Amino acid sequence: MKILIVNDCMNAGGTEKLIKDICNLYNKNNIDLYLATFTKGEWDYIVDGNVSGHYYFEKKRNSNGLMNKVCKYFFNMPQYQVLKENFDVCIVFKQLCYETMRYVKAKKYILWVHEDYAYNVLYESKKWWKRKLAYKHKKKFLKNYNAIVACSANAKESYEKYYKLHDLFVIKNSINEIEINDKCEETVDLPISFKENYMVNVSSLSDTIEGYGKRVDLLIQLFYQCLQYNNDLKLIIIGCGKLKYDLENLINDLKINDKCILLGKIDNPYPYIKNASLMLSASNAESFGLSVAESMYLGVPVVCFYNRGISDFINNGQNSIVVDNNEDFVNEIIKVNHDNDYKIKLSLNAKKSMESNADILGYVKKIEQLAFKVLVGE
C-alpha cells in the first residue's frame, strides 16, 4: 500500500511529533510511506531517512493569475502544482491543509483533525464575510474525503456539529512512551537558581488571534500575578516562535528575569518536564494537548485552561486542574504549590491515568488499519 502523509511543514510541534513517530514506526514490509509538505522544516532530516520520498508542493507557475489571486485572497490558499506520483491513500494530517487533495492523485483521501475547528475559522480572516466564504468553501471539500478522523471525542463532536458532518472516526493521539522513557533521565542545563522547584511550560511562541491561541504572553502575566502571593515561584518556558523577542521584552518590563526564563528550542524537553513541580498551559487552542499529556505521564500535574480534547484525559481536581478564567488559574497555582499533599495526590493520579494513552505502536497500527479499511471500501 502506497500512503502519502501531507502536512504544512515539519517544524517542531505536537502534530509533527506524531508524524515523526509514524515515519519511524510504520510497517515497512506492507507500506511504502511518503511525505509531502509546503515548505522545508527543521525536522526534515529526521523523517526523510524513514520514508520512501519527501515532496515539496510547488506553486503554479502562473502565480500572478486571477484564480491564484482569488484563492489566496478569499481562502488564504495559493494554487499549487499537482504531484506527479500516484498514491493509494493520501492522509492530510492537518485540517488547515484540507484543500491539498486538489494537488494529490490518490484513490482515497483521509483528513485528520488535530486543531480546534474554531481556530480554523479565526485563521482564515478577521473579516466575517471572508470567514463565511471560507466556511462554505471548506465544507464542500470535506464532503469529498473518504474519511475524517478526529484526535479526541470532543473534537469529533464539535467538528460534526459545526460542519454538519456525520460518522467521523476517533483515533486519540498517543504519547510516545518509548521515547519519553528513553530520554527523560538526561541531565538538564539550567541556572543554579532554577535547579529545583520550578514550573514549566512547553509551547510554540505563536500569535494569539482574537484571544485564541497558545497565549504564552497571558501565561507570563498570570505568573507575575502568582508572584505577588508567592515570590519563591519560578517558571521556565520551552519553545520557539516569532513572539520570542516580544515575550522577552514582557519579562523585562515586569522585572521578573530572575523568576521566568525562555529556554527556546530544546531537542529533548522530557527531563525538564520530569524535574518540574508543575506544568502550566494558558493555551485555549488545543484539540488534544500533547505536552499536557506527556507531562502527566511523567507524573507532573498540570494547571491549564479548558480545551476540547483535554477533558478526555483530565479528571479535574484528581489528576490535574482545568480552569476557565484567569483568576482561577492563578488561585490553583498558588493552592497546588502551597499544599504539598494535594500536589502529591495529583502527581500520582496523573501518571496512573495516562498509562492508557501511552501506546505509540498501537497508535501507528490503528492508522495503518484505517488506511487499509478506507482503501478497500469497508
Image (cartoon, rainbow, N blue to C red):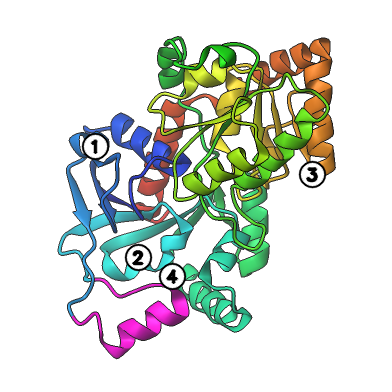
Tell me which numbered mark, 4 or 1, is placed earlier along the sequence: 1
- Quarter where residue 185 is shown: top left
Q: Secondary structure at mark 1?
A: loop
Q: Which residue is mark 1?
A: 30
Tag count: 4
Q: What's under tag 3, amino acid-wise?
A: Asn
Residue 24 screen position, x and y as percent: 30, 31
Q: What's under tag 4, amino acid-wise?
A: Asn
- Contact (CB < 8 A) between labels 3 and 2? no
Q: Which residue is mark 3?
A: 326
Query: Which mark, by number, is residue 100?
Result: 2
Tell me which numbered mark, 4 or 2, is placed earlier along the sequence: 2
Tell me which numbered mark, 2 or 1, is placed earlier along the sequence: 1
Q: CA distance from mark 4 to mark 3?
A: 41 Å
Query: Which mark, by number, is residue 144?
Result: 4
Tell me which numbered mark, 4 or 3, is placed earlier along the sequence: 4
What residue is shown at x 46% (from left), y 61% (from top)? 96
Horizontal side of residue 10 vs 208, given as left or right: left
Crowding at dot 4, Cα within 10 Å, few <14 / some 14-19 / many 20+, comes out as few
